[in-house]
Amino acid sequence: MLRYPGNEYKVFGTLHANGETVSAGPKTATLPAPVAAQALPSSRALNKPASRTAVTLAFLAIYVIWGSTYIAIWYAVASIPALYTAGFRHIIAGSILLSWALVKGQRPTWPQIRASVVIGFFFFLIGHGTLHWAETKIPTGLASLLIASEPIWVFLIACAAEKRWRMNGYLLSGVVLGLAGVALLMGRDVWSAGRGVFWGAVACLIGAISWSAGIIYSRRSHLSGSPLLLSALSLLAGSAMLLTTGTLLGEYRGFSFSAVPVRAWLALAYLILFGSVIAFTAYNWLLEHYSPTLVATHTYVNPIVAVALGWWIAGEHVSVNVAAAALMVIAAVFLVDRGMARLKNA
């Protein structure tokens, strides 16, 4: 949501619509598919839309657009400081969504604002901040695969928070396979590429774990309300923290708006309009008409799209290790998803 060269999600206890289900904004904040599958009531899957064209376009949005946000982030952070890139993206997307919510007559409460600050910290400052920085160090394909491990961390953190380890064969296989895939990704290729690549990969893992912790917090906060309003507040809180942190770290030194090439601005605009607003809207619409399990299939497709675009557009090398790890991580996410569904129905 995958994130993350450009992903996002929906939160706050009830599933309000990343990649990904506790969503906070567009892969602007997409929560792992397994989470959505557990949280949404099955009744929402009954009323299917009639227009095949609309359905096809909506699925293409969450499959391709969210998968392409990684390469868009790569283009943006090549010329705009990483935390500023994420901050600009989220403050504009959040402002658009907040304006929309206010026009609809929605007003935030103080508990929602307070929770949005926490969500903004986990999702956007740490989750997206580390991802944008990491993409200055590592290939987009590697970043997407490390971020794709989020459902595994969500399960492990949820078990730790509940102090109850519920397990079945699918879950055990998924967790073991996923951790093995992450270990393979962090193996020889990363070590041999130098310290910058290693720390970039570590940053991606930290971001994935932080995003997962944010999902658990949002589910335990028991807040309800408009997903649109809650997403907007989280995006704005996260953007404030990103821009402040970037300034404290000196990202403003040597940075000039006039020196940023058109390509970087176009990449940032793509992240805002397509990655956050359009894909997020499509995601929420699909959840209103189809089962969360079907909609959550974007979790498996996004890394494939990201790796393919990284190879095609950025000329990234896809080694045997990366290809094998990709299959392991994607299969692990599927197994964890199946295992959680079995627990829910047990």
Image (cartoon, rainbow, N blue to C red):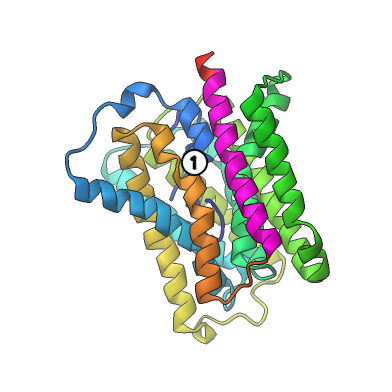
Q: Which of 338 and 45 is in front in this view?
A: 338
Residue 2 in the figure: left or right of residue 157: left
Is 295 in the magenta? no
> At x 17% / y 39%, what residue is drawn?
50
Q: What element carries label 1?
A: loop
Percent position (x, y) of residue 81? 61, 72
- In which quadrant of the rendered image does the C terminus lie? top right
Examine the rendered structure and indicate whether residue 149 appears above or below residue 326.
above
Tell how many labels. 1
| Residue 334, magenta (yes or no) | yes
Front-lying residue, 179 or 233: 179
Residue 213 visible? The answer is: no
Q: Find residue 185 and report its horizontal and vertical position in percent.
A: 72, 56
Q: How crowded is mark 1: few (under 14 residues within 10 Å), some or many (20 or more)?
A: many
Instruction: Kindly identify which residue carries mark 1.
Output: 20
Q: Nearer the viewer, residue 217 or 40?
A: 40
Give the residue at x 47% y 26%: 39
The magenta region covers 320-343
